[in-house]
Image (spheres, rainbow, N blue to C red):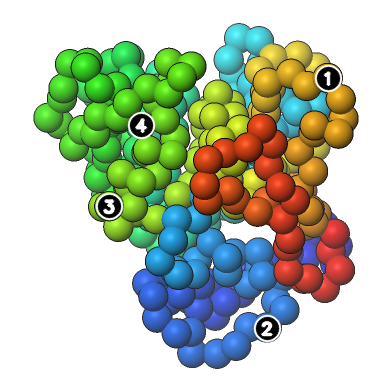
Amino acid sequence: MTASSFRVDEAVWRGLLALRRGETPQRDHGQDPAWTLYEPIARRDGRSFVVAQVGQSLDGRVATVDGDAIPISGADGFAHLHRLRALADAVIVGAGCVVADDPRLTVREVEGPSPVRVVIDPSGRVPPGAKCLSGEGGAILVRAEGGTPVDEPTSLCLPRDGDGRLCPRALLAALARRSLRTILVEGGAATIRHFLQAGLVDRLHVTVAPIVIGSGAPGLLLDPISRLSEALRPQCRVMPLGSDTLFDCAFDRVSTDPPARLAIGSVPDAGGIW
Protein backbone atom coordinates (compact mmCIF):
# COMPACT_ATOMS: atom_id res chain seq x y z
CA MET A 1 0.00 0.00 0.00
CA THR A 2 1.41 3.37 -1.00
CA ALA A 3 0.93 6.56 0.95
CA SER A 4 -1.76 7.75 -1.48
CA SER A 5 -3.78 4.51 -1.80
CA PHE A 6 -5.66 4.44 1.51
CA ARG A 7 -9.31 5.10 0.89
CA VAL A 8 -12.60 4.33 2.56
CA ASP A 9 -14.87 2.61 0.07
CA GLU A 10 -18.45 3.91 0.08
CA ALA A 11 -19.83 0.43 0.81
CA VAL A 12 -17.40 0.01 3.70
CA TRP A 13 -18.43 3.33 5.20
CA ARG A 14 -22.13 2.47 4.86
CA GLY A 15 -21.41 -0.79 6.66
CA LEU A 16 -19.59 1.05 9.44
CA LEU A 17 -22.47 3.49 9.91
CA ALA A 18 -24.88 0.53 10.02
CA LEU A 19 -22.72 -1.08 12.70
CA ARG A 20 -22.76 2.20 14.62
CA ARG A 21 -26.57 2.07 14.58
CA GLY A 22 -26.47 -1.46 15.99
CA GLU A 23 -27.41 -3.06 12.68
CA THR A 24 -25.77 -5.97 10.84
CA PRO A 25 -23.86 -4.81 7.72
CA GLN A 26 -25.15 -6.23 4.45
CA ARG A 27 -21.78 -7.70 3.51
CA ASP A 28 -18.58 -8.94 5.12
CA HIS A 29 -15.72 -6.51 4.53
CA GLY A 30 -13.15 -8.91 5.95
CA GLN A 31 -9.63 -7.52 6.07
CA ASP A 32 -10.31 -4.27 4.23
CA PRO A 33 -7.87 -1.84 5.95
CA ALA A 34 -10.53 0.81 6.55
CA TRP A 35 -12.88 -1.77 8.04
CA THR A 36 -10.27 -3.16 10.45
CA LEU A 37 -9.33 0.39 11.48
CA TYR A 38 -12.82 1.71 12.21
CA GLU A 39 -14.80 -1.44 13.07
CA PRO A 40 -13.79 -1.51 16.77
CA ILE A 41 -15.09 2.06 17.11
CA ALA A 42 -18.28 1.51 15.13
CA ARG A 43 -19.27 -1.69 16.94
CA ARG A 44 -21.69 -1.37 19.86
CA ASP A 45 -21.35 -4.12 22.47
CA GLY A 46 -22.90 -2.45 25.51
CA ARG A 47 -19.73 -1.19 27.18
CA SER A 48 -17.89 2.09 27.00
CA PHE A 49 -15.20 2.31 24.32
CA VAL A 50 -12.78 5.26 24.37
CA VAL A 51 -10.61 6.42 21.49
CA ALA A 52 -8.29 9.40 21.93
CA GLN A 53 -7.11 11.31 18.85
CA VAL A 54 -4.07 13.56 18.37
CA GLY A 55 -3.14 15.29 15.11
CA GLN A 56 0.46 16.51 15.27
CA SER A 57 3.62 17.44 13.39
CA LEU A 58 6.65 15.21 12.85
CA ASP A 59 8.21 16.67 15.99
CA GLY A 60 5.12 16.09 18.10
CA ARG A 61 3.63 19.60 18.13
CA VAL A 62 -0.03 20.56 17.83
CA ALA A 63 0.44 24.34 17.71
CA THR A 64 3.12 27.03 17.46
CA VAL A 65 4.29 28.99 20.50
CA ASP A 66 1.67 31.61 19.61
CA GLY A 67 -1.12 29.03 19.42
CA ASP A 68 -1.46 28.75 15.64
CA ALA A 69 -2.77 25.22 15.05
CA ILE A 70 -4.55 25.32 11.71
CA PRO A 71 -3.75 23.60 9.50
CA ILE A 72 -1.35 20.99 10.92
CA SER A 73 -3.22 17.91 9.74
CA GLY A 74 -3.62 17.46 6.00
CA ALA A 75 -6.91 16.79 4.22
CA ASP A 76 -6.75 13.03 4.85
CA GLY A 77 -5.93 13.45 8.54
CA PHE A 78 -8.82 15.89 8.85
CA ALA A 79 -11.21 13.45 7.14
CA HIS A 80 -10.03 10.71 9.51
CA LEU A 81 -10.91 12.89 12.51
CA HIS A 82 -14.39 13.50 11.11
CA ARG A 83 -14.88 9.74 10.61
CA LEU A 84 -14.05 9.24 14.28
CA ARG A 85 -16.59 11.91 15.22
CA ALA A 86 -19.24 10.28 13.03
CA LEU A 87 -18.70 6.89 14.69
CA ALA A 88 -18.69 8.26 18.25
CA ASP A 89 -21.69 8.84 20.48
CA ALA A 90 -19.91 11.77 22.15
CA VAL A 91 -16.74 13.80 21.72
CA ILE A 92 -14.94 15.16 24.79
CA VAL A 93 -12.81 18.30 24.90
CA GLY A 94 -11.46 20.44 27.71
CA ALA A 95 -12.26 24.08 28.31
CA GLY A 96 -8.77 25.16 27.21
CA CYS A 97 -9.30 23.61 23.77
CA VAL A 98 -12.60 25.47 23.35
CA VAL A 99 -11.22 28.81 24.55
CA ALA A 100 -8.15 28.55 22.28
CA ASP A 101 -9.72 27.20 19.06
CA ASP A 102 -13.54 27.56 19.36
CA PRO A 103 -14.11 24.29 17.44
CA ARG A 104 -17.51 23.17 16.15
CA LEU A 105 -16.80 19.46 16.78
CA THR A 106 -19.45 18.47 14.22
CA VAL A 107 -19.20 16.08 11.26
CA ARG A 108 -18.78 17.92 7.98
CA GLU A 109 -16.16 16.11 5.89
CA VAL A 110 -17.90 12.72 5.73
CA GLU A 111 -21.41 11.29 5.83
CA GLY A 112 -22.65 10.53 9.33
CA PRO A 113 -24.21 12.00 12.47
CA SER A 114 -22.55 14.60 14.65
CA PRO A 115 -21.74 13.41 18.17
CA VAL A 116 -22.88 14.97 21.42
CA ARG A 117 -20.24 17.53 22.43
CA VAL A 118 -19.04 17.13 26.02
CA VAL A 119 -17.05 20.09 27.32
CA ILE A 120 -15.12 19.68 30.58
CA ASP A 121 -15.32 23.12 32.18
CA PRO A 122 -15.01 22.87 35.98
CA SER A 123 -14.31 26.59 36.45
CA GLY A 124 -16.76 28.12 33.97
CA ARG A 125 -14.19 29.32 31.41
CA VAL A 126 -16.16 28.48 28.26
CA PRO A 127 -18.11 31.46 26.86
CA PRO A 128 -21.86 30.93 26.27
CA GLY A 129 -21.42 31.64 22.56
CA ALA A 130 -18.86 28.89 21.92
CA LYS A 131 -19.61 27.14 18.61
CA CYS A 132 -19.56 23.64 20.09
CA LEU A 133 -22.42 24.46 22.48
CA SER A 134 -25.01 24.64 19.70
CA GLY A 135 -25.95 22.75 16.58
CA GLU A 136 -26.66 19.16 15.60
CA GLY A 137 -26.00 16.53 18.25
CA GLY A 138 -26.40 18.74 21.31
CA ALA A 139 -23.90 19.55 24.03
CA ILE A 140 -23.19 18.77 27.67
CA LEU A 141 -21.25 21.21 29.84
CA VAL A 142 -19.43 19.42 32.67
CA ARG A 143 -18.87 21.38 35.87
CA ALA A 144 -17.40 20.54 39.28
CA GLU A 145 -19.69 19.68 42.18
CA GLY A 146 -20.21 22.69 44.41
CA GLY A 147 -19.78 25.17 41.57
CA THR A 148 -22.40 27.38 39.99
CA PRO A 149 -24.91 25.16 38.13
CA VAL A 150 -25.91 25.99 34.56
CA ASP A 151 -29.09 25.09 32.68
CA GLU A 152 -28.13 25.61 29.05
CA PRO A 153 -26.77 23.56 27.46
CA THR A 154 -27.47 20.45 29.54
CA SER A 155 -25.12 20.53 32.50
CA LEU A 156 -23.49 17.71 34.44
CA CYS A 157 -21.79 18.11 37.82
CA LEU A 158 -19.03 15.69 38.81
CA PRO A 159 -16.73 15.28 41.82
CA ARG A 160 -13.09 16.25 41.64
CA ASP A 161 -10.46 13.54 42.06
CA GLY A 162 -7.50 13.56 44.47
CA ASP A 163 -5.60 16.00 42.23
CA GLY A 164 -8.49 18.45 42.08
CA ARG A 165 -9.47 17.46 38.53
CA LEU A 166 -12.83 16.16 37.42
CA CYS A 167 -12.82 12.38 37.61
CA PRO A 168 -12.71 10.87 34.08
CA ARG A 169 -14.08 7.53 35.33
CA ALA A 170 -17.10 9.30 36.83
CA LEU A 171 -17.60 11.15 33.55
CA LEU A 172 -17.65 7.92 31.52
CA ALA A 173 -20.15 6.42 33.95
CA ALA A 174 -22.39 9.49 33.73
CA LEU A 175 -22.27 9.43 29.92
CA ALA A 176 -23.06 5.69 29.85
CA ARG A 177 -26.19 6.40 31.88
CA ARG A 178 -27.22 8.64 28.99
CA SER A 179 -26.48 5.82 26.50
CA LEU A 180 -23.29 7.57 25.33
CA ARG A 181 -20.73 4.77 25.38
CA THR A 182 -18.48 5.19 22.35
CA ILE A 183 -16.39 8.20 23.26
CA LEU A 184 -13.87 10.26 21.28
CA VAL A 185 -11.44 12.25 23.45
CA GLU A 186 -10.26 14.94 21.06
CA GLY A 187 -8.34 17.42 23.16
CA GLY A 188 -6.50 19.13 24.47
CA ALA A 189 -3.33 17.48 25.70
CA ALA A 190 -4.29 17.69 29.39
CA THR A 191 -7.66 16.04 28.80
CA ILE A 192 -6.10 13.20 26.82
CA ARG A 193 -3.45 12.79 29.54
CA HIS A 194 -6.08 12.38 32.26
CA PHE A 195 -7.87 9.61 30.35
CA LEU A 196 -4.63 7.83 29.42
CA GLN A 197 -3.20 7.90 32.92
CA ALA A 198 -6.51 6.74 34.41
CA GLY A 199 -6.27 3.63 32.22
CA LEU A 200 -9.46 4.45 30.34
CA VAL A 201 -8.32 4.54 26.70
CA ASP A 202 -8.95 1.60 24.38
CA ARG A 203 -7.39 3.14 21.27
CA LEU A 204 -5.02 6.08 20.76
CA HIS A 205 -4.92 7.45 17.21
CA VAL A 206 -1.97 9.71 16.44
CA THR A 207 -1.96 11.25 12.97
CA VAL A 208 1.38 12.74 11.95
CA ALA A 209 1.63 15.40 9.24
CA PRO A 210 4.89 15.93 7.29
CA ILE A 211 5.66 19.26 8.89
CA VAL A 212 8.33 20.31 11.41
CA ILE A 213 7.35 23.16 13.74
CA GLY A 214 10.37 23.11 16.05
CA SER A 215 8.68 24.43 19.18
CA GLY A 216 5.23 24.93 20.59
CA ALA A 217 2.53 22.90 22.32
CA PRO A 218 3.12 19.12 22.47
CA GLY A 219 0.42 16.69 21.34
CA LEU A 220 0.97 14.30 24.24
CA LEU A 221 2.25 15.40 27.63
CA LEU A 222 2.20 12.73 30.35
CA ASP A 223 3.57 12.82 33.87
CA PRO A 224 7.38 12.34 34.02
CA ILE A 225 8.81 8.84 34.44
CA SER A 226 12.28 7.74 35.61
CA ARG A 227 12.66 4.47 33.71
CA LEU A 228 11.67 3.34 30.24
CA SER A 229 10.10 0.27 31.83
CA GLU A 230 7.37 2.65 33.05
CA ALA A 231 6.61 3.91 29.53
CA LEU A 232 3.34 3.14 27.79
CA ARG A 233 3.91 0.36 25.25
CA PRO A 234 0.72 -0.22 23.29
CA GLN A 235 0.61 -2.57 20.36
CA CYS A 236 0.70 -0.35 17.30
CA ARG A 237 0.25 -0.45 13.56
CA VAL A 238 1.08 2.29 11.08
CA MET A 239 -1.37 3.17 8.32
CA PRO A 240 -0.64 5.68 5.53
CA LEU A 241 -3.71 7.88 5.18
CA GLY A 242 -2.33 9.90 2.27
CA SER A 243 -1.47 13.40 3.47
CA ASP A 244 -0.80 12.08 7.00
CA THR A 245 0.41 8.89 8.67
CA LEU A 246 -1.73 7.23 11.32
CA PHE A 247 -0.40 5.35 14.35
CA ASP A 248 -3.22 3.12 15.61
CA CYS A 249 -2.31 2.19 19.19
CA ALA A 250 -4.28 -0.36 21.23
CA PHE A 251 -4.43 -0.69 25.00
CA ASP A 252 -6.17 -3.16 27.28
CA ARG A 253 -8.37 -0.70 29.14
CA VAL A 254 -8.54 -1.15 32.88
CA SER A 255 -12.05 -1.88 34.15
CA THR A 256 -11.35 -1.56 37.90
CA ASP A 257 -9.23 0.93 39.83
CA PRO A 258 -6.58 2.37 37.46
CA PRO A 259 -2.98 1.18 37.86
CA ALA A 260 0.08 3.39 37.53
CA ARG A 261 0.45 2.42 33.89
CA LEU A 262 -1.64 0.83 31.15
CA ALA A 263 -1.35 -2.74 29.99
CA ILE A 264 -0.36 -3.71 26.48
CA GLY A 265 -3.27 -4.38 24.15
CA SER A 266 -3.68 -5.92 20.73
CA VAL A 267 -4.65 -4.78 17.26
CA PRO A 268 -6.23 -7.13 14.68
CA ASP A 269 -4.09 -7.86 11.66
CA ALA A 270 -4.85 -5.62 8.68
CA GLY A 271 -2.65 -7.01 5.98
CA GLY A 272 0.65 -6.45 7.71
CA ILE A 273 0.55 -2.67 7.86
CA TRP A 274 2.36 -2.33 11.19
Per the image, label 3 sits on a secondary structure element best described as: loop
Q: CA distance from mark 1 to mark 3?
A: 39 Å
Residue name at image x 73 percent, y 69 percent: 268
Question: Dot 1 corresponds to which residue?
Answer: 226
Quadrant of the image containing the N terminus:
bottom right
Query: What residue sits 60% from the left and 50% below the top?
Result: 253
Can residue 100 be seen from the camera position used here? no
Label 3 is placed on what type of residue? Arg
Pointers 3 and 2 in contact (CB under 8 A)? no
Q: 49 or 68, which is in the foreground?
A: 49
- The mark lying in front, picked from 4 and 1, is 1
Above or below for 21 versus 134: below
Disc on the earlier residue, 3 or 2: 2
Dot 2, how many residues are within 10 Å of its Cα: few (below 14), some (14-19), or many (20+)? Answer: few
Return the residue at label 2.
30
Mark 4 sits on what residue? 119
Mark toward the viewer: 4 or 3: 3
Three-letter residue code for mark 4: Val
Residue under the image location 66 percent in, 10 percent down: 65
Cα distance in 3D space between marks 3 and 2: 33 Å
Alpha carbons under labels 2 and 1: distance apart:
42 Å
Structural distance between the alpha carbons of marks 4 and 1:
33 Å
Asked if the residue at tag 1 contacts the one at tag 2, i.e. Cβ–Cβ closer than 8 Å, the answer is no
Number of residues whose C-alpha sits closer than 10 Å to that of mark 3, classed few (under 14), some (14–19) or many (20 or more): few
First in sequence: mark 4 vs mark 1: 4
